[in-house]
Image: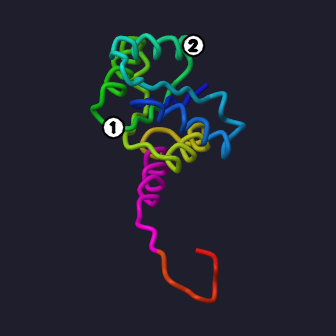
Amino acid sequence: MKYLLLVSHGDFATGLKTSLAMFAEDKIDQVIAVGLKNGKTVDDFEKDFRQAISGLTADDSVVVLADIIGGSPLTTACNVLDELGKLENAVVLGGMNLPMAITSAVMKDMLEGDDFVQAVLPEAQAALQEFKITSDDDDDDI
């Protein structure tokens, strides 16, 4: 099985998983979310991450989404995955947002490697735009 691992600072990963369930409820049992809580150490995060992925088998693979490339949650997760022999075949992406998570959850079992990345990143990038409000006296909706 292929799992989607969400890692972040604070509660972003766990909150994102909650939101993701609204869009991909049938995939949520394949999503694992771990956050580096405020006031906790990287060692605490590593322990929490190891516990969260303890059910993965030798045949399982992972897609990792992180809030920040180079941040402690991502680097720690990658170190643990490398130690377990899971990093070599993993897809690891940073700058996660809800569209990225939705696309990843839906497409993770359909596409591999670069094809997967090329499907996910444009969705994440397309979500980044300014929302402009225009004044229209005839319509009460935004």
Marked residue nearer the N-terminal end (2 or 1): 2
The verdict on residue 130 being magenta is: yes
Residue 38: image tag: none
Three-letter amino acid code at disc 1?
A: Ile
Q: Main secondary structure of the magenta part?
A: helix
User: Residue 41, position in %: x, y?
Assistant: 33, 15
Locate residue 95 relative to residue 49 in the image: left or right: left
Determine whether the residue tagged by mark 2 lies in a helix, strand or loop.
loop
Three-letter amino acid code at disc 2?
A: Thr
Residue 57: image tag: 2
Q: Quadrant of the C terminus?
A: bottom right
The verdict on residue 126 being magenta is: yes
Locate residue 114 relative to residue 22 in the image: left or right: left
Locate residue 43 relative to residue 110 in the image: left or right: left
Asked if the residue at tag 1 contacts the one at tag 2, i.e. Cβ–Cβ closer than 8 Å, the answer is no
Question: Among all residues in the image, which is located at the extreme bottom?
Answer: 138
Q: Residue visible at 66% across and 46% down?
A: 23
Q: Quadrant of the N terminus?
A: top right
User: Residue 114, position in %: x, y?
Assistant: 42, 44
What residue is shown with label 1? 68
Q: How many marks?
A: 2
**Numbered range of the magenta stretch:** 116-132
User: Residue 84, position in %: x, y?
Assistant: 42, 12
Residue 92 in which image quadrant: top left
